[in-house]
């Protein structure tokens, strides 16, 4: 029967104009057109034997399409050739089961294999595959309360993709395939409690095992080679958990006609991690004595920093516009500073360091005509530290998507730029859903970066990618 | 003896006009009765719906799908609230296809023209409930669609009749039934938020159900047509169980087949809140209790 539908466009001779022969509309029995008027067949499988498990197998291929040579302000250079950057196979598993009244078990995991050409293939630090547990939590909801324990995410803020309050989860950005901020979130072990009342909702969490953004993969698109100081490469180190640390937070929210507001407070750890270089001063000393500064890579030390966050978020729907606003006030966050130290036989030298400061951050924007067929959003975020004579930093994010042919084709574009224009990314994508089981995605990503940035090597990059997905149950 | 005659005359005049009034009701009161029927069928209701969409063409003077229709199975729960129960709250949750299972849409529809309707969606990729700016749309952009179908939030609205000029245009026949033809034209304020500059509704004279609606854009061209069938009486109220929306610009259609309608069930008001979109444990527990009243 499926063949019938595919052949039909070829057999039709009437075309669009004839399709609007409106007398024919009244002649048509739409009930017959869509088959049996019987709920049992359609709903039986959903309600009597629900499919709790969903699987997806996907293959992702990304290539560099622009061969070029770029230089940094600091004298280094980077040659980009036509090459495969990503070639990987992934199995995603998702499980959701409301196994008893008020109870839910939900989990998701992935198995990934890096194939020939992928930047992770033959990585000396790990094998050619990885398993990862993303979500795994059990939830109980009864009356006005809901409790959940396990690996999960907590999302605060209204400005999608650019919220200064979306800081609770760690994020993983290893390459340019996770264009959307929300796709890069990683779950943590949390205990959450939600209280739903007529006067608003209270949501709280406690995290006794805070996790941090994973280290960038050396050789990957965002960290092609280790940074060097005086020609000596640095090796970033993971955080070594040597004591109990925790995060906790609470958020109260309330909906009004056409608007939602929320206030929140939390004790959190800063992400991403910061690093110190305990060997830096001795290295300068050795260099001053004309000795070899170091034999191996410079070891770094990860620094954790607890801080307090106060936040406010709101949205307001005005006809076709949804306005969003997020405000975050962070106390005791680390801010980069240059200090000095005195070396024997050398004198005073500048040394990078940190200082605790308070930070104000604001993000806001609008969504226009958002619907399953067409969405557009524009947002700006800006951050400023107290007591630092630096320009305000932030991001601009513009997104547009349009679905066509009954959601069979989705066209999307993302433009992301730092406020100062140091780095800009443009993403164009086409998602083509062939049927309920098969999807193909095509991506074009261009990046422009300034020569004085750490990611100068991304300048003039053009990446083309394709992902084929097979959903099965 | 004369005085009574003078007093009787106006009464006789009114009585003389009563048959004419029955034959020619005003459009506004007709649509109010139609909407009352819709509200009656939406109060404390649980429906199972098959939502089918496809690009259409003609074959042997019959409309047919030019591609394999995309079929979704939905469960919807609705209640009426507010003054005189003229506001409606409804939630629709996708059961099939499995890849979209659990996606939900919550809608608050207000009778008061001064209050914009409200819509929330749960998008799993965002991990949060999103309020949708549901002030509908203008001719240049699409209003929020019901799960990608040709039905939009605007098509499902009730109330706000004060925002329309309503005229009875005459009578006719549709699908073998005697109908009133009622034209609605939005006022300037409503027109800014509506895709339709004019709508012609074919209201079944006896059952007070809209059997067909032709929607016209600002250029005067018909852009959408709604066709209803399978009109049945549910708890004393006539309702159409099969509604087809044809998008005459995109040549796409969607059919909403209400496979099961159950009214008068016990639905807690807190089920029609954004919590139901995110708290799956709560939602499934409540749905199980609702299904138990139905099955």
Image: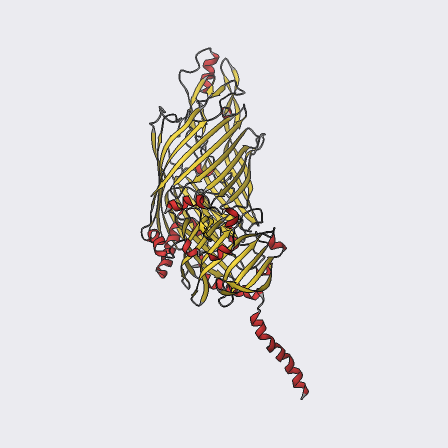
List x then y, in percent, for residue A229. Answer: 47, 19
Residue A329 lies left or right of residue A282; in this view the side is right
Q: Position of residue B293 (x, y in %)?
A: 36, 61
Instruction: Answer above or below: position of A407 versus B175.
Output: above
- Residue furthest to the right in view is B2
Q: Is residue A192 visible?
A: yes
Quarter in which the N terminus of chain B is drawn: bottom right
The outermost residue toward the bottom is B1
Question: Could you say where residue A219 lies in the image, as x and y percent from the top left?
Answer: 42, 24
Q: Nearer the viewer, residue B111 or B136?
A: B136
Q: Residue at x 49, y 68 (%)?
A: B206
Residue A199 visible in the current orientation: no
Q: Position of residue B78 (x, y in %)?
A: 45, 58
Question: Colour scheme used in the picture?
Answer: secondary structure
Q: Using the rendered view, name the quadrant where residue A28 is placed.
A: bottom left
Q: Nearer the viewer, residue A197 or A66?
A: A66
Q: Is residue A155 above or below residue B207?
A: above
B35 vs B220: above or below: below
Residue drawn 46% across and 41% down? A409
Q: Which corner quadrant holds the C terminus of chain B?
A: bottom left
């Amino acid at each position: 029967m499926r063949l019938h539908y595919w052949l039909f466009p070829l057999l039709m001779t009437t075309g669009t104009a004839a399709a609007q022969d409106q007398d024919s509309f009244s002649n048509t029995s739409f009930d017959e057109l869509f088959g049996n008027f019987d709920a049992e067949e359609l709903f039986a499988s959903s309600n009597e034997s629900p499919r709790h498990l969903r699987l997806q197998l996907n293959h992702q291929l990304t290539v560099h399409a622009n061969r070029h040579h770029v230089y940094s302000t600091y004298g280094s250079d980077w040659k980009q050739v036509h090459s495969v950057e990503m070639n990987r196979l992934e199995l995603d598993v998702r499980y959701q089961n409301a196994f008893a009244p008020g109870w839910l078990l939900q989990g998701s995991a992935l198995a990934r294999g890096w194939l020939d050409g992928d930047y992770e293939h033959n990585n000396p630090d790990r094998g050619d595959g990885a398993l990862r547990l993303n979500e795994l939590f059990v939830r109980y909801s009864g009356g006005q309360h809901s409790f959940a324990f396990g690996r999960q995410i907590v999302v605060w803020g209204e400005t999608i993709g650019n919220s200064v309050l979306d800081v609770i989860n760690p994020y993983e950005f290893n390459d340019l395939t996770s264009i959307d901020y929300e796709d890069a979130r990683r779950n943590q072990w949390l205990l959450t409690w939600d209280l739903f009342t007529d006067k608003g909702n209270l949501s709280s969490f406690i995290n006794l095992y805070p996790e941090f953004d994973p280290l960038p993969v050396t050789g990957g698109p965002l960290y092609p080679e280790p940074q060097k100081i005086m020609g000596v490469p640095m090796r970033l180190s993971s955080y070594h958990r040597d004591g109990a640390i925790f995060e906790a937070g609470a958020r109260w929210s309330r909906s009004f006609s056409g608007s939602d507001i929320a206030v929140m407070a939390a004790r959190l750890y800063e992400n991403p991690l910061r690093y110190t270089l305990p060997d830096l001063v001795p290295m300068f000393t050795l260099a001053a004595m004309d000795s070899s500064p170091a034999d191996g890579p410079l070891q770094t030390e990860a620094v954790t920093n607890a801080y307090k966050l106060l936040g406010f978020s709101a949205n307001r729907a005005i006809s076709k516009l949804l306005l969003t606003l997020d405000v975050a006030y962070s106390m005791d966050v680390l801010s980069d500073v240059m200090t000095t130290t005195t070396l024997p036989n050398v004198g005073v030298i500048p040394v990078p360091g940190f200082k605790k400061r308070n930070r104000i951050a604001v993000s806001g924007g609008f969504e226009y005509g958002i619907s399953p067929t067409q969405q557009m959003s524009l947002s700006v975020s800006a951050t400023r530290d107290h007591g630092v004579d630096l320009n305000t930093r932030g991001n601009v994010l513009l997104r547009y998507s349009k679905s066509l042919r009954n959601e069979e084709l989705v066209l999307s574009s993302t433009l992301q730029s730092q406020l100062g224009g140091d780095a800009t990314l443009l993403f164009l994508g086409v998602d083509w859903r062939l049927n309920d089981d098969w999807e193909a995605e095509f991506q074009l990503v261009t990046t422009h970066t300034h020569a004085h940035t750490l990611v100068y090597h991304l300048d003039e990059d053009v990446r083309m990618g394709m992902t084929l997905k097979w959903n099965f149950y | 003896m004369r005085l009574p005659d003078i007093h009787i005359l106006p009464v006789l005049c009114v009585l003389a006009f009563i048959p004419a009034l029955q034959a020619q009701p005003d459009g506004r009161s007709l649509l109010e009765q139609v909407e009352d029927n819709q509200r009656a069928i939406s109060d404390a209701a649980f429906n199972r719906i098959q939502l089918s969409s496809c690009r259409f063409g003609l074959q042997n003077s019959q409309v047919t799908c030019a591609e394999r229709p995309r079929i979704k199975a939905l469960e919807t729960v609705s209640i009426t609230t507010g003054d005189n129960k003229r506001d409606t709250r409804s939630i629709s949750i996708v059961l099939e296809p499995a890849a979209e299972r659990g996606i939900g849409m919550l809608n608050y529809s207000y009778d008061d023209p001064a209050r914009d309707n409200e819509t929330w969606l749960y998008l799993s990729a965002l991990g949060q409930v999103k309020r949708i700016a549901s002030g509908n749309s203008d001719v240049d952009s699409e209003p929020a669609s019901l799960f990608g179908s040709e039905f939009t939030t605007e098509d499902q609205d009730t109330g706000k009749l004060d925002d329309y000029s309503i005229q009875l245009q005459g009578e006719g026949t549709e699908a073998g039934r005697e109908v009133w033809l009622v034209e609605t034209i939005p006022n300037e304020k409503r027109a800014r938020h509506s895709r339709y500059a004019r709508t012609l509704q074919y209201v079944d004279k006896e059952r007070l159900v809209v059997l067909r609606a032709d929607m016209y854009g600002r250029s005067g061209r018909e852009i959408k047509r709604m066709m209803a069938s399978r009109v049945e009486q549910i708890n004393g109220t006539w309702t159409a169980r099969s509604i087809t929306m044809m998008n005459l610009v995109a040549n796409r259609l969607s059919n909403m087949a209400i496979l099961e309608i159950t009214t008068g069930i016990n639905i807690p008001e807190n089920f029609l809140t954004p919590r139901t979109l995110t708290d799956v444990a709560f939602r499934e527990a409540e749905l199980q209790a609702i299904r138990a009243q139905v099955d």
